[in-house]
Image: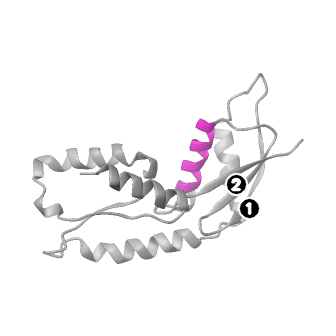
Amino acid sequence: GVTQQDQRLAERVDGSGCPIVIVLNKWDRVATEDRTDVLVDIADRLAFIGYAPVLKASAISGRGAHRILPALYAARDDYRRRVPTAVLNRVLAEAQAAHPPPAVRGRRPRILYGTQAAIEPPTFALFVTRELPSNYMRFLDRRIREAFGFEATPIKIRVRLRHE
């Protein structure tokens, strides 16, 4: 299972902005009826890195080990990925159309445009009319991840206020 030390280490890696791949070693030693519970426990205790892929492997038998290096290379590629501004703005416009940001003090914020400000980790700057609520920021995080396939790397979203 996930220990408190595992959680602290994962928090530090996530906080540093590094890509993460979770490898469950000795998976073949987990009883078949307990596997779902183990995965639920991992998802619960490591929810803050829910974007990270979880690989199941066995170092002794080698089962699943062939997936580790490709996952690490994919994580590295995600970490260095650049997103074209026009495509990012199309995704942001579709997200706003499907689910507009909630009104704050009677006024609805709008995302004017966004751009990728950096890589390693991918960092996006959104220029908005008003501050966006944290739940809407999580929604945008998910939308960006889905649209561009960011799976094993944290992404950062910075909000910049601009007047219309």
Image point (38%, 49%), residue name:
46
Image point (53%, 69%), residue name:
78
Residue 19 coordinates in the image, percent (x, y): 48, 65
Quick check: 7 above or below 97?
Answer: below
Image point (57%, 42%), residue name:
139
Q: Residues within 10 Å of mark 1 (few under 14, many from 20)?
A: few
Q: Is residue 36 magenta?
A: no
107 to the left or right of 14: right
Instruction: Name the secondary structure under disc 2.
Output: helix
Residue 85 coordinates in the image, percent (x, y): 73, 63
Give the residue number, with chain letter if any, for mark 2: 90
Residue 56 coordinates in the image, percent (x, y): 25, 63
Instruction: Name the secondary structure under disc 1.
Output: helix
- What residue type is disc 1 on? Ala
Magenta stretch, overall SS = helix
In the image, which residues are magenta?
134-145
- What residue type is disc 2 on? Arg
Give the residue number, with chain letter if any, for mark 1: 86
Q: Residue furthest right?
A: 164
Q: Residues within 10 Å of mark 2 (few under 14, many from 20)?
A: few
Q: CA distance from mark 1 to mark 2?
A: 6 Å
114 to the left or right of 12: right
- From the viewer's side, name the closer residue of 158 and 128: 158
